[in-house]
Structures are given as structure tokens and as C-alpha cells.
């Protein structure tokens, strides 16, 4: 259940409505500002009929929207028009809008390894058609003995690479206490597959002061509903700028790293207004399979791709087997624009408009 508050309320009046609704419903709910409107979200299933009438009679509430799904703010029942997420507008770089029609091409190494590697790959992916640079400074590795990333040094190298290339940067944050720091450097925060249900981290990414957009990767074996509820945590904590990234789910065949669930892309387009991108690198684990699955992702309606690229994949400190070269990226970027042009107007060509209330 979503209560949309009147725009002219003062902060004091809004918090008064919030506490009245909390008293009546017995729920704290979440009060956040989304596209200029203040909205208070509750679990409607726990609001009985009498409480509903009391809430409906309160002043200050413009409209009540019943949402039949467990996720509310990310649902198309709340907002039917597609959301476009702008990335890079707070730093000196070429900002992009993910979900506005043109496919986002996010490319770069799995991990920031050193200055030369990052700067070289940043310029090469840019030439190949990338619109954003990726690179992990804090790496969630399966073994504690593997390369764990350069940490803070990696973040400052990424910021320098943004300055040189003009590409906005996305990098992973693993701990709630590091969100402010990572957000200070980055244009977009990445929540990795292993952390999709790390609720303190989701909340911290929602609340942090820089309000950077968040790329939320699908959990290793998460259902679509669990994934959307994870996105809901971020939005309900105050950050409406979330992009979902399908990166494959755990399968049984060791010949591929994961199973790329492409059905998730058009399904998510039905269920949520948030943009959806595809990561064919972690989905396949194998560079030879990346171009075909990248094309398939865009054909399925994805708003962009996240691809791991290395100038010397055989020397990569992390995920070298799935890394493609900048030259291969050039073809993927070219094909993506061509394929997106063919499907334009189907689902992702709709213009992103404001909130319907
Ligand atoms: C990554 O993008 O580098 C990464 C670790 O991905 P995932 O969380 O999907 O495994
Ligand atoms: Mn990787």
C-alpha cells in the first residue's frame, strides 16, 4: 500500500502524517521522495479495513495506491513508465542515462590491477564504444588467497581513469561502512551477486549521502521476486536510482560458469520500471561465448551490457577466462546498437516520464 502525500506539506506536516499512519497501522513504513513526490509505503496485507478507513480520512494524503505484489516502489503498479537512471552527472565526465533507449555499454577489467593496465584498457574500451568503465577495487573472491583488489588505491585509479577517458565509473562496494567512501569516488555503486541479500548493505546504498545510482546484480540463486525485493530495500531507503543486472544463476553444468536467464529480461520489463542490463561475462565464464550472449541480451530487451575486457586476458589477475579484448568489444558495441535499433519501440523505447499518481 502506497500513500502519496500532498506536495505542499511542510517537513513537519509530513512527519506528522507519517506518525499518525504508523500509529494507526502499527507499522513504521518508509517515507521517501521519488521523482518529486513524497510516498509512504506500508505492507497493505497487514492494514485491516478499519485502519484503512482511518488512514483514508487523514488530511495530507493525496492518493492511496494498492499494490498487489510484495515489492511496491519498484513495481509497475506504482509507476508504469520506464525509469531512466542517469549516471555520471556529479563528476566531470560524459554522463549517460541507462534505460533511455540507447544501450549502455559498460566495460572494463574484472579488477583494477595497476595504473598501466587500467589506463590502457579505459582508453581502449572508450575507443571501442564503451559508455561507462567498470573495474573492481574491492573484490569478493571465493578463496581468501586470491587477489582481493587494490582497495582505496584502486578507487583513486578509477577516478583518474574517469578523468582521462571521460567515462563514468562503476565499482563494487562490499561493506555498509565503505559505502560513503566508494560513493565519493564512483559514479555508480555495484552490489555483487554474493551481497544481493545483504540487507544492511542494501540499506546503506539507499541512504548514503551522495545518492549514487546502484547496480544490483542478481543473487547466485535468487528468484526474480527476491531480487526485486532487494531492489525495493534500496529504493525504500531513499535511493530510487537502481539498475538490475542479470549475470546468470547457478546451474549444474561445469562447462559454463552460470546459466544466463534471459527470460528474466522481458519478465522484469513487465514487473518493474527499473532498467535491466545483462552481464554475459559472469553468466558464461568463457570469452568465446560472450559475444553471442551479449547480442542475445540486447535482443531480449536489455538496456545495456556489462562486459569484462582486458588488453591481455591471459595475464588478468581475476576472471581472465571470460575477458574479451577491446577489439571484440567494438563488435559487440556495434551489434548492440544495431539490434537495439531493431527492437526499439517494443518495450524499452517508451519515453521515461514522471510518476503517475
Ligand atoms: C564482478 O562484476 O566483478 C563480479 C564480482 O560479479 P558478480 O558479483 O556477478 O559475480
Ligand atoms: Mn569478474
Image (cartoon, rainbow, N blue to C red):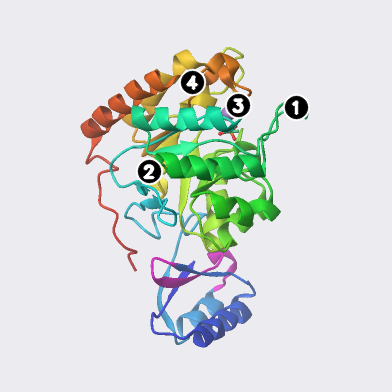
**Would you place residue 60 above or below residue 247 in this image?**
below
The tag on residue 29 is none
State if disc 3 and disc 2 touch (CB < 8 Å): no
- Of discs 2 and 1, which sits in the foreground? 1
Q: Secondary structure at mark 1?
A: loop
Is 126 on the left-hand or right-hand side of 149? left
| Residue 240 location (% of width, % of height) | 47, 58
Whole-Å distance between the Cαs marked 3 and 4?
Answer: 28 Å
Residue 263 visible here: no
Query: Is the CB of mark 2 within 8 Å of ligand 1?
Result: no
State if disc 1 and disc 4 touch (CB < 8 Å): no
Whole-Å distance between the Cαs marked 4 and 2?
Answer: 34 Å
**Would you place residue 19 above or below residue 198 in this image?**
below
Give the extent of the magenta segment: 34-48
Q: Earlier in the sequence, mark 2 or mark 1?
A: 1
Residue 258 visible here: yes
State if disc 1 and disc 3 touch (CB < 8 Å): no
- Residue at 41% x, 52% y is 92
Residue 37 sits in which quadrant?
bottom left
| Residue 79 location (% of width, % of height) | 37, 59
Whole-Å distance between the Cαs marked 2 and 1?
Answer: 36 Å
The tag on residue 250 is 3
**Would you place residue 284 above or below residue 18 in this image?**
above
| Residue 167 location (% of width, % of height) | 41, 41
| Residue 296 location (% of width, % of height) | 36, 25
Mark 2 = which residue? 269
Q: Earlier in the sequence, mark 4 or mark 2?
A: 2
Mark 1 = which residue? 143
Q: Secondary structure at mark 2?
A: helix
Mark 4 = which residue? 311
Amino acid at each position: 500500500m502506497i500513500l502519496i502525500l500532498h506536495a505542499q506539506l511542510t517537513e513537519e506536516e509530513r512527519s506528522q502524517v507519517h506518525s499518525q499512519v504508523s500509529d494507526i497501522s502499527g507499522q513504521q513504513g518508509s517515507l521517501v521522495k521519488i521523482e518529486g513526490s513524497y510516498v509512504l509505503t506500508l505492507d497493505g496485507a497487514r492494514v485491516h479495513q478499519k485502519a484503512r478507513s482511518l488512514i483514508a480520512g487523514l488530511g495530507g494524503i493525496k492518493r492511496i495506491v494498492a499494490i498487489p505484489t510484495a515489492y511496491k516502489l519498484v513495481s509497475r503498479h506504482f509507476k508504469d513508465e520506464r525509469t531512466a537512471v542517469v549516471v555520471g552527472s556529479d563528476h566531470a565526465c560524459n554522463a549517460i542515462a541507462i534505460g533511455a533507449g540507447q544501450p549502455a555499454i559498460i566495460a572494463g577489467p574484472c579488477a583494477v590491477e595497476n595504473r598501466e593496465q587500467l589506463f590502457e584498457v579505459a582508453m581502449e574500451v572508450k575507443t571501442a564504444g564503451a559508455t561507462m568503465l567498470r573495474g573492481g577495487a574491492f573484490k569478493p573472491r571465493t578463496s581468501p588467497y586470491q587477489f582481493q583488489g587494490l582497495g582505496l588505491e584502486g578507487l583513486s585509479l578509477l577516478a583518474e581513469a574517469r578523468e582521462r577517458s571521460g567515462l563514468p565509473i562503476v565499482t563494487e562496494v562490499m561493506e555498509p561502512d565503505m559505502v560513503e567512501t566508494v560513493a565519493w569516488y564512483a559514479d555508480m555503486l555495484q552490489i555483487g551477486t554474493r551481497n544481493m541479500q545483504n540487507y544492511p548493505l542494501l540499506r546503506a546504498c539507499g541512504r548514503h549521502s551522495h545518492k549514487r545510482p546502484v547496480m544490483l546484480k542478481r543473487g547466485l540463486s535468487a528468484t526474480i521476486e527476491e531480487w526485486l525485493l532487494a531492489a525495493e530495500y534500496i529504493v525504500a531507503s531513499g535511493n530510487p536510482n537502481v539498475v538490475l543486472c542479470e549475470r546468470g544463476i547457478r546451474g549444474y553444468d561445469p562447462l559454463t560458469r552460470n546459466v544466463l536467464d534471459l527470460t528474466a529480461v522481458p519478465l522484469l520489463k513487465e514487473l518493474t520500471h527499473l532498467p535491466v542490463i545483462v552481464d554475459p561475462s559472469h553468466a558464461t565464464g568463457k570469452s568465446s561465448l560472450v559475444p553471442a550472449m551479449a547480442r542475445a541480451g540486447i535482443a531480449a530487451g536489455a538496456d545495456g551490457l556489462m562486459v569484462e575486457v582486458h588488453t591481455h586476458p591471459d595475464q588478468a589477475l581475476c576472471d581472465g577466462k571470460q575477458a574479451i579484448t577491446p577489439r571484440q568489444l567494438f563488435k559487440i558495441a556495434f551489434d548492440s546498437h544495431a539490434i537495439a535499433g531493431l527492437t526499439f519501440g517494443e518495450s524499452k523505447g517508451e519515453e521515461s516520464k514522471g510518476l503517475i499518481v
